[in-house]
Every structure is written in structure tokens, then in C-alpha cells.
Amino acid sequence: IDMTLRMYLEPQFELDRGILVSVYEDTVKKKQELLSQLPANIDKPQLMSNPQLATVLEGYGVVIPMKVSPTTNKPTYAFAKSDPGWKDLEDEYENDPLIASILAARTGVKSTLAETRSLRLVGIADRYEKFRVPLRYYAAHTGRYGGSEKINAQNFTRIDPKLTHRRQLRYAIKAPEGYSVLAADLMQIEVRINAWISNCLKLIRIFQDGRDPYCEFGTEIFHRTITKADIKERFISKTCILGLGYGMGWKKLQSTLRKDDVKITDMEAHDYVSIYRHTYREIQNTWGVCGSAIEIICNGGAFNLGPCHAEKGKIILPNGLALHYNNLRMVHSKKYEGWAYDFAGQGRTLWGGKVVENICQSLGRIV
């Protein structure tokens, strides 16, 4: 808590206003270029509106992708840039200059994060010169930080070696004279913790030997030696290692990869899940252990996993902090049947793999 307060009340980071303005102007220029490639009868308001965009695309004979809204449970347009239907549309029309330009312009004008963030930081630079890092302590259920003041300093866009410094927001955040800015990362921390609490010796030995777990699993699923030079294969393997450790199924794996423009077949997705659960079966067993423990957390009793132990309504971490499961209950309804609890005024579902994820993220937070 002390560090969190000092980052805001005693700021040290300096902001380079020139770089921030360059990032903002570059973002605006890119959007203008996308709009300039469109026919005269298509404007920005049409691209921003889902119904109007659908009308435009239908006018060119495009079949509109649909999805079921998770909010209303009714059909709605699949126009989010991460929607599989939208991705399929981009693939289908990648060689059609007109439709491709409409799709690219839509994605461009709807992506406002870089524009609003750089402009907001320009305002901060003008008012304070220093960057007060606004973080909410223990904002998430697992104890992770949350953003504040419309800025999340935890997810600034990564540095792209292909771009100049003046076009990248991270280079606008500078250390005072005599100091340097370092980007620290606990490499694969959740994977390591999951292997440890599950006593998954095969995965533990990979870390002990200094090998790359993503390349190792890639070698398993692609049936050939995978190295860091195999960019696509290693990325697929990384997605598997990070997601399948918490019980992700084949459909979710497939859709997760699709968001990053990686396509795998149903059979491949099935195979990757099956191979993971066979290769690291101790982790799969831990989901079952934690699934059985939910009833103990609900009603009270003894449960230990690694350095954590459970009491009624919560799991106690080794430093005394706790994962709270308020109003933990069994739900029986048409939409869902299983365990649920309340957090931040909303109901959340709970199962064995989710408990494992909660524990790993919480332990990773306090390492």
C-alpha cells in the first residue's frame, strides 16, 4: 500500500509532451487515411453505428455476421474486432479492396484507446509535468491492481521495434536524470505456481532445467522440435499453456486463438486440449480437488492446497490476505447450474479450474 500511495503522491516519472503529441497526431492521421480510402457516400458516423454499418455492407452484398449477445441473450451484430464472425469477414474479403477498406476503417475509427490515452497524458503533462501513477489497490477479486482516473498504467502498448521512439507511448514515460526505467516481468509466474501447487513434476523440471515451456509443449502438439524461431507454433503453444491450465475447453481455445488471427480446426483444438491434459495430468487432477473443495468453502471444513488453506467463505493466502467468496451458493436455473458467488455487486460463477486460477493469480500477486 505504501508504494501504491507514493507512486501517486510522490511521482517520479516524467512525461515527454512531444512524444505524446506525436502519438496522438499519428493516431488521428491513420484514421483520416483510412476514411480517405472510402467511397464518398460512406462517412465516419456510418462506421461507428452498428445498424448503419450493416446497411452499408448489405448494400455491397455482404452477409452480416451475427452472434448471441451475452447481455441480452438475443442475436446482435458480430462487429467487434475480436469476434470470430468479424475475423471471418476480414479473411473472406481480404482481396476485395472496397470491402477490405470499409472493414479496416471501421476497426480503425472504433479503436480509440491510443487516441484518448495519449491526449489524456498530454493534459497530465501540461498540469503536473510528472506522471502520478493512479492504481487501485486490491481492485480485483484476486488482489490485482486496477486502473483509475481513466488510465490503466498496467497495460500500456508494448514497444514495437519496427516503430520509432516518437511514435510509441511508452517512450513518453521517462525516469528523472540519473535513473532508468526498467520493465520487470515475473516470467510465466502463474504457470510455475500452477505446476508447483499441482506437484506436476514434468512441468517443474522444465523450469528447473531452464527450458522454455511453450517450446516444450509445442514440440508435443506439432510432433517436431519447436524453438523460439517458430513464431506461430510457439504462440499457439503459449496460448495453450496459459489457458488450458485452468480448464479451458477446445471451443474457447479455438476462439481465443482466432482473436489473434490464428486459425485452428476443431480437431486440432480437441487434440491440443487432450494432449495438455494427458501431458500435465496432475494439473487436471487439481481442478477436481478444488472443485470438491468449493462445498467445503461454502459450508466450512478443512482444505489445503500448497501454502493456502480454506475457511468458510474464503481461502487464506500465506501472507494473511484472503480470497473471499461472498454468498457462495449452488445455483439451479435455466441459464446456469453450478456454484456462484458475489463480487462487486455482481454474481460470478465458480468451478474447480476457476478456483485454481484464483489461487495462482493471488499467489503471483504476492510473490
Image: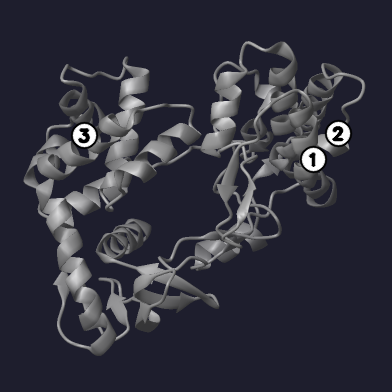
Identify which amino acid the numbered label 3 is placed on: Asp
Q: Residues within 10 Å of mark 1 (few under 14, many from 20)?
A: some
Work out whether mark 3 precedes mark 2 in sequence or the reverse, and give the earlier one. 2
Tell me: 19 left or right of 196: right
| 99 and 58: which is toward the camera | 58
Q: CA distance from mark 1 to mark 2?
A: 6 Å
Residue 281 place in picture, x, y as percent:
11, 48
Residue, disc 3: 271
At x 13%, y 38%, the residue is 208
Where residue 44 is drawn, which disc sits there?
2
At x 29%, y 38%, the residue is 240
Q: CA distance from mark 3 to mark 1?
A: 39 Å
Q: Which element is circle 1 on?
A: helix
Residue 87 position (above or below residue 334): above
At x 49%, y 35%, the residue is 259
Q: How is the image coloured?
A: one colour
Residue 251 visible: yes
Q: Which element is circle 3 on?
A: helix
Residue extending farthest to the right is 40
Q: Residues within 10 Å of mark 3 (few under 14, many from 20)?
A: some
Residue 293 position (above or below residue 275): below
Where residue 318 is drawn, which disc sits there?
none
Quadrant into which the C terminus falls: bottom left
Residues marked 1 and 2 touching at CB (< 8 Å): yes
Residue 196 place in picture, x, y as percent:
16, 53
| 181 and 53: which is toward the camera | 53
Residue 47 place in picture, x, y as percent:
80, 35
Residue, disc 1: 48
Residue 17 visible: no
Residue 83 place in picture, x, y as percent:
55, 39
Q: Which element is circle 2 on?
A: helix
Residue 232 position (above or below residue 121): above
